[in-house]
């Protein structure tokens, strides 16, 4: 009884529900025999990994679905031991080097070399290369990315690398140019609605169109989120109704409360309170970029048009600094403080004008 | 009162320079040296001569001043210059003034002289009429009343003449004043400004004129003034006149309108105070008293508070000349300062008084000798002063006091003299009796001593005080020279509850306690024995230089114990302690017996002093601490340990076996008096306030103070304030204090250097402290805007931080970070810090964050086979849903729900720990769903889970850890824990095999996504077969 999102995941390129054209292209690519390095990128929940697994299956057949966990140990130059868990089949190995934090370079160097240096035994019946699947490639440090570029060329004969990333902007140009970039864009609202209805039908439920639409809109193109939300709706209430409330994740609710607290009162004490909440969010591993984005969205809804440009500019400035700096709380707090000062000033000016 | 006050001091100082402009001729300068009688004659002559010259100059300068009204900044500088010059040539004696004849001369001079300016400017003419008072009058135009201050000075110099003028002035001003009342306050202010400038310019000119004047005239002592007034029977005494003038103006100023403007409010109290402040005044104080009593209605108090908040700082700092008095002239006097003094910041005022041996306290008591009242004084202080009959004086009067009071002998000197005398007597007697007995004792001891262990016994004769003459002969450090020789000489250890006393009691009852078999009570708390009777050892801890070693030595001496001292210079490894010390401690000394002093061989004679125990470290002292503890457990002699840092981790164990005595730093005064005595003995002259600075700057380190003093005396100079600053001990302040200082308003005027140094006390944590605490500071205005700016700056500081600590490692940017992360926020926010400084929670939050990241990674890893998406997706999308799926069935369906939950766990390959951590990191606002599950259900679930015995596709990495954790969790739930653990272990073993699988190449698919459920059984059997 897996979650629907896992239960109804398509397994092969032919069964993909959207971007069929791209799927066909990939199929042809695989059939042509040779296969380049790939950089698959796109937003969360667009189906990158699903697509990659489908490609692998197309390449190697069912064997690729026999996955196993492996723990690998690496030793850094400073003699620190790193444990990285990987997932592997006979034909590929999937690794998330960013688990190793700043030592991801070591992982890239060691792991890929060991994999790449072994040839496939039955090259007659199988492909002559193995695949290394690197997740969260955009989180690789620059060092690791540079370590990757030479490896990619050197071991081209025995190994292909598939990088999976959210954005290419953080992948260095040298790597981008060595890969076939495949963008997997988010499904449209309609596509999501179709999938939701399809899944519900399979589950023996009837999903009202209106609700499907609302869920799709809520998900903002994130199919995973849409499916999870749909299932949550099912758990919450069945039969579905059109105006049913979509259960939100706790952190989203919390974030929303936070922003309404900011609008409600602007004072040093409130700022302290907000800091607590921001810490809370960060501690729960909610990415700071996400916090900043959602905060801005909520605040924009509550502030006057004349303020908006200033606030957006400030948000951009602080977000930029956040990327440059290392303690997100400083920047989030600075943004909130800035907003409070601006907003309060605006309110006070408005008051005096009224008088 | 404020404005008048403001000018008054300047006028006084000025009049010091200015007095009689006519006397400016050079001949006057030379006169100073002449005998008094002659001088007076000369003076009157020269005055007349110089009159014309002075007038001419006056005119020239006037025009100058007019043009300069526009830009007065340069003028100020000029004026100051003049002031200095005047100072240089003014070593005159107060007696000069006593004669009346010169005074009358002066009066005529001044009058005639004044006529010219009058022509030029009507207003100024006024002022000029009494030259030195010009500034106040100007002010007073605004302010109306003739400035009383002026009069004080004028009375001193010119007697009645001046006063008459003042009186006329007062009358003339009234109409002016009324007009002004009609004007808006803004206009008034502008006027004030203009007038101010006028004043300054004018004063410039006057200064010039009067430059030389000061030499001749020094302020007469109050007594002198009195005689003056008496002799001039016709003219009323100056003070009387003042009163007369004042009272009408007062009445007028008291219109309600006036009360609104802060300036006028501040004015009104002045007249009331005046009579009080002038001790000789004849007006009944009762008149003014009612005014004061009326004011403290609540509204007024609020008003007063508002005023207090807004009141400005001193307005004439640096412009008023601070008088020099004779040494210790304020000795024995206690001052309280209220309101704002115009010429001095509060601290400076305190300093000034202390320099002359006086004392400044903050509240009035019976012992207070003077209340120094400035502008906007505190009403309650004033009232109390009146009640207690404390003398109330103004700022100028304070200066006057300093100038006129005769120097005294410092109390310290007196004490020191006494002490020395007493000692001399004592020494004489002792030397006679003692000498013979000590010699054999020494010899004996040398034979007994072991080479490594120092048996230190300090004979009284060796270190006892000697008379002043002898000190110089010996090349000893002062610290040794003046080492206390009996317990009474210990600084700051005289009280019943002092450490020395406690130690003494402990030591004296040590053997009795051992005999009684008292056991130490461990754990401390309120049950801990207060006298430490149960302990076999004592631990003295405290900062360096406050006399811990000396104290313990003296205590031993006091009780007649001999002691063995081990300090950091001795090897204190386990071996050496065992061999040497324990041996020594378990036997008894022959020294006393042999010396013949004491005929019984007494077991209690030894004490072991372990000095600097926190320094026991490294290879040298390996095992020493443990051995010491062992020793303490069995010792037959008392052991006294000494350390600096009581909280040092090394001492943690030791402290459990010791009677804990924490020696505090002695108070500054305690050190001061002791040191003054020594200084006197050494013939070093040092002002009490300088000494105080030195003591404070060394952080109350007696030893350091003595060293510094020794150094000063060697240099031959008289130490002054500058030396004190130089002697500043580098005090390492903690991050907390540094953070407080960053925002401290009193540090506002520090240099950038000093401010950045706050950051460098600990640059790794300083930014965190600033960030943690800046929100709690209350700046004076515009709070949110300042917050935003500070936050902005802190954010930039973080970017710099990344550059420093990141891959680029630009450590040269540290000063930049200091500016952004500490200095700027401090500047923006500067203000009162509400509450205490918090430790940065970022550290705690960050480690929680890391822990949670690890959990998410682990969960992602475990669920990976069946899910897509990276950690973020898992955390943000999956986990909230899973949380519900894992808890809701148990809450709603209770035992029936168990199965649902188990399937989820199985599908996603989650262990029980995973479930716990999952619930933990998805928890918001502290709502724990597990609490709403019945314990029965929980137990059923645990049982079911253990029974289900999932096969996991991965190895449990931290099996042992997980086991421990699990035992903890499960222990509450049921007794099947044991079984569960076994199962886990078993599956872990199996997974170990799968771990090797890659090498073998034949793999065991742990699951096929869709068929996980079905394959579970098969997998299990397969695996079993393999293993």
Image (spheres, grey):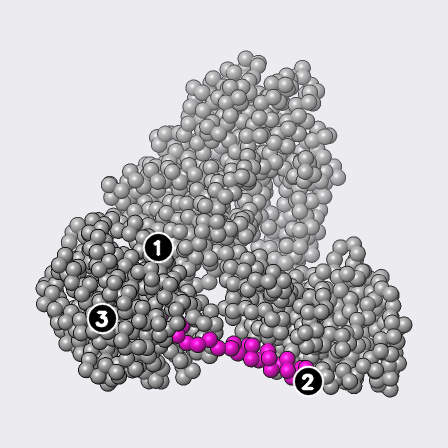
Q: Is residue A295 left or right of residue B530?
A: left
Q: Looking at the image, tell me whether mark 3 or mark 1 is earlier in sequence order.
A: 1
Residue at figure coordinates x 55%, y 25% from the top left: A162
Q: Main secondary structure of the magenta part?
A: helix
The quadrant of the picture occupied by the C terminus of chain B is top right
> How far across and down, in percent of the image, does residue B991 sit?
69, 40
**Residue A65 sits in which quadrant?**
top right
Q: Residues within 10 Å of mark 2 (few under 14, many from 20)?
A: few
Label 1 sits on a secondary structure element that is helix
Q: Chain of mark 3?
A: B
Label 2 sits on a secondary structure element that is helix
Q: Chain of mark 2?
A: B
What segment carries the magenta color? Answer: B396-424
Residue at figure coordinates x 51%, y 31% from the top left: A138
Mark number, residue B425: 2
> How far across and down, in percent of the image, does residue B535 sit?
72, 76
Q: Are marks 1 and 2 on the same chain?
A: yes
- Label 1: which residue? B81
Q: Is residue B889 left or right of residue B715?
A: left
> How far across and down, in percent of the image, does residue B37 sit?
35, 74
In this rendering, is residue A77 above or below B242? above
Q: Looking at the image, tell me whether mark 1 or mark 2 is earlier in sequence order.
A: 1
């Amino acid at each position: 009884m897996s979650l629907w999102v896992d239960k109804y995941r398509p397994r092969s390129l032919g069964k993909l529900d959207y971007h069929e054209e791209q799927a066909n292209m990939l199929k042809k690519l695989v059939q042509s025999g040779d296969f380049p390095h790939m950089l698959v990128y796109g937003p969360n929940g667009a189906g990158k990994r699903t697509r990659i697994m489908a490609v692998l299956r197309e390449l190697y057949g069912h064997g690729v679905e026999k996955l196993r966990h492996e723990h690998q140990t690496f030793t850094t130059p400073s003699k620190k031991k790193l444990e990285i868990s990987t997932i592997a089949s006979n034909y590929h190995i999937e690794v998330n080097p960013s688990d190793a934090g700043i030592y991801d370079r070591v992982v890239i160097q060691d792991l890929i070399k060991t994999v790449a240096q072994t040839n496939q035994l039955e090259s007659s019946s199988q492909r002559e290369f193995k695949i290394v699947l690197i997740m969260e490639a955009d989180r690789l440090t620059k060092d690791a990315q540079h370590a990757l570029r030479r490896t990619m060329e050197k071991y081209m004969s025995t190994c292909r690398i598939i990088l999976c990333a959210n954005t290419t902007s953080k992948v260095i140009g040298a790597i981008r140019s060595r890969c076939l970039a495949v963008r997997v864009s988010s499904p449209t609202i309609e596509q999501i609605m179709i999938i939701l209805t399809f899944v519900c039908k399979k589950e023996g439920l009837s999903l009202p169109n209106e609700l499907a639409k609302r869920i799709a809109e809520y998900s903002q193109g994130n199919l995973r989120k849409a499916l999870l939300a749909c299932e949550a709706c099912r758990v919450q209430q069945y039969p579905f109704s059109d105006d049913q409330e979509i259960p939100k994740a706790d952190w989203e609710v919390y974030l929303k409360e936070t922003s309404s607290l900011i609008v409600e009162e602007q004072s040093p004490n409130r700022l302290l309170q907000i800091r607590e909440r921001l810490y809370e969010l960060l501690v729960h591993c909610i990415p700071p970029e996400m916090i900043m984005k959602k905060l801005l969205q909520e605040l924009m809804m509550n502030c006057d048009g004349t303020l908006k440009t200033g606030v957006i500019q400030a948000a951009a400035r602080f977000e930029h600094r956040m990327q440059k700096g290392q303690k997100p709380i400083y920047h989030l707090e600075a943004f909130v403080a800035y907003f409070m000062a601006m907003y309060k000033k605006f309110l006070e000016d408005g008051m005096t004008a009224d008088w | 009162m404020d404005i008048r006050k403001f000018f008054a001091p300047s006028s006084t100082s000025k009049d010091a320079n200015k007095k009689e402009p006519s006397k400016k001729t050079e001949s006057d300068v030379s006169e100073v040296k002449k005998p008094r009688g002659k001088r007076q004659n000369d003076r009157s002559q020269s005055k007349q001569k110089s009159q014309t010259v002075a007038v001419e100059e006056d005119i020239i300068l006037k025009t100058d001043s007019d043009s300069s009204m526009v830009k007065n900044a340069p003028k100020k500088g000029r004026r100051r210059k003049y002031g200095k010059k005047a100072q240089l040539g003014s070593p005159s004696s107060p007696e000069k003034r006593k004669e009346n004849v010169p005074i009358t001369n002066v009066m005529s001079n001044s009058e005639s002289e004044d006529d010219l300016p009058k022509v030029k400017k009507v207003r100024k003419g006024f002022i000029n009429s009494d030259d030195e008072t010009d500034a106040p009058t100007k002010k007073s135009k605004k302010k109306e009343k003739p400035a009383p201050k002026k009069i004080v000075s004028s009375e001193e110099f010119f007697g009645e003449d001046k006063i008459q003028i003042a009186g006329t002035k007062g009358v003339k001003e009234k109409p002016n004043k009324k007009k002004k009342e009609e004007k808006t306050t803004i206009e008034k202010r502008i006027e004030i400004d203009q007038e101010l400038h006028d004043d300054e310019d004018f004063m410039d000119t006057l200064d010039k004129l009067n430059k030389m004047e000061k030499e001749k005239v020094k302020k007469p002592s109050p007594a002198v003034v009195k005689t003056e007034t008496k002799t001039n029977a016709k003219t009323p005494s100056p003070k009387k006149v003042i009163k007369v003038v004042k009272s009408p103006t007062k009445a007028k100023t008291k219109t309600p309108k006036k009360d609104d403007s802060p300036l006028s409010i501040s004015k009104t109290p002045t007249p009331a105070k005046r009579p009080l402040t002038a001790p000789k005044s004849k007006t009944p104080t009762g008149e003014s008293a009612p005014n004061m009593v009326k004011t403290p209605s609540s509204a007024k108090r609020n008003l007063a508070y508002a005023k207090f908040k807004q009141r400005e700082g001193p307005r004439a700092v640096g412009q008023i000349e601070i008088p020099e008095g004779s040494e210790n002239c304020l000795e024995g006097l206690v001052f309280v300062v209220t309101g704002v003094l115009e010429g001095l910041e509060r601290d400076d005022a305190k300093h000034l008084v202390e320099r002359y041996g006086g004392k400044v306290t903050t509240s009035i008591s019976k012992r207070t000798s003077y209340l120094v009242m400035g502008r906007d004084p505190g009403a309650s202080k004033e009232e109390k002063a009146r009640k207690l009959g404390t003398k109330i004086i103004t700022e100028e009067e304070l200066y006057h006091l300093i100038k006129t009071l005769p120097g005294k002998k410092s109390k310290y000197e007196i004490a020191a003299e006494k002490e020395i005398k007493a000692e001399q007597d004592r020494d004489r007697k002792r030397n006679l009796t003692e000498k013979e007995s000590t010699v054999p004792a020494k010899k004996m001891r040398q034979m007994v001593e072991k080479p490594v262990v120092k048996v230190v016994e300090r004979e009284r004769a060796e270190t006892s005080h000697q008379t002043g003459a002898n000190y110089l002969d010996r090349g000893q450090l002062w610290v040794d020279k003046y080492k206390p020789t009996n317990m009474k000489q210990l600084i700051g250890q005289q009280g019943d509850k002092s450490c020395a006393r406690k130690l003494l009691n402990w030591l004296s009852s040590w053997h009795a306690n051992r005999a009684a078999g008292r056991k130490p009570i461990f754990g401390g708390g309120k049950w801990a024995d207060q006298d430490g009777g149960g302990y076999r050892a004592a631990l003295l801890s405290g900062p360096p230089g406050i006399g811990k070693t000396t104290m313990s030595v003296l205590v031993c001496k006091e009780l007649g114990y001999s002691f063995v001292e081990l300090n950091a210079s001795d090897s204190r490894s386990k071996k050496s302690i065992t061999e040497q010390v324990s041996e020594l401690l378990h036997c008894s000394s022959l020294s006393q017996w042999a010396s013949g002093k004491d005929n019984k061989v007494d077991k209690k004679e030894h004490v072991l002093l372990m000095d600097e125990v926190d320094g026991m470290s490294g290879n040298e002292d390996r095992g020493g601490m443990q051995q010491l503890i062992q020793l303490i457990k069995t010792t037959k002699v008392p052991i006294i340990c000494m350390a600096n840092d009581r909280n040092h981790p090394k001492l943690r164990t030791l402290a459990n076996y010791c009677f804990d005595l924490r020696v505090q730093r002695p108070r500054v005064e305690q050190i001061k008096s002791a040191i003054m005595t020594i200084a006197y003995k050494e013939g070093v002259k040092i002002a009490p306030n300088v000494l105080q600075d030195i003591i404070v700057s060394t952080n109350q380190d007696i030893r350091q103070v003595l060293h510094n003093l020794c150094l000063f005396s060697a240099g031959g100079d008289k130490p002054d304030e500058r030396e004190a600053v130089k002697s500043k001990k580098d005090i390492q302040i903690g991050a907390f204090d540094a953070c407080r200082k960053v925002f401290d308003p009193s540090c506002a005027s520090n240099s950038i250097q000093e401010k950045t140094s706050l950051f460098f006390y600990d640059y790794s944590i300083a930014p965190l402290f600033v960030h943690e605490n800046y929100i709690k500071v209350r700046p004076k205005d515009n709070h949110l805007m300042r917050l935003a700016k500070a936050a902005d700056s802190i954010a930039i500081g973080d970017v710099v931080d990344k550059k420093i600590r990141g891959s680029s490692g630009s450590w040269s940017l540290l000063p930049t970070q200091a500016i952004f992360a500490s200095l700027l926020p401090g500047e923006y926010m500067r203000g009162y810090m509400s509450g205490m400084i918090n430790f940065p929670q970022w550290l705690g939050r960050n480690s929680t964050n890391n822990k949670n990241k690890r959990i998410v990674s682990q969960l992602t890893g475990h669920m990976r086979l069946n899910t897509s998406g990276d950690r973020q997706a898992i955390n943000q999308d999956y986990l909230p849903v899973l949380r519900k799926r894992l808890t809701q069935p148990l809450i709603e369906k209770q035992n029936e729900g168990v199965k649902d939950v188990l399937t989820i766990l199985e599908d996603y390959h989650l262990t029980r720990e995973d479930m716990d951590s999952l619930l933990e990191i998805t928890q918001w606002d502290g709502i724990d769903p597990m609490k709403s599950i019945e314990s029965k259900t929980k137990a059923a679930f645990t049982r079911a889970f253990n029974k289900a015995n999932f096969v996991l596709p991965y190895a449990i990495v931290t099996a042992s850890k997980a086991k421990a954790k699990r035992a903890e969790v499960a222990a509450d739930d049921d007794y099947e824990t044991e079984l569960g653990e076994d199962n886990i272990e078993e599956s872990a073993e199996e997974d170990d095999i799968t771990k090797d699988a890659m090498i073998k190449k034949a793999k065991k698919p742990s699951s096929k996504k869709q068929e996980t459920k079905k394959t579970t059984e098969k997998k299990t059997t397969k695996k079993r077969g393999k293993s």
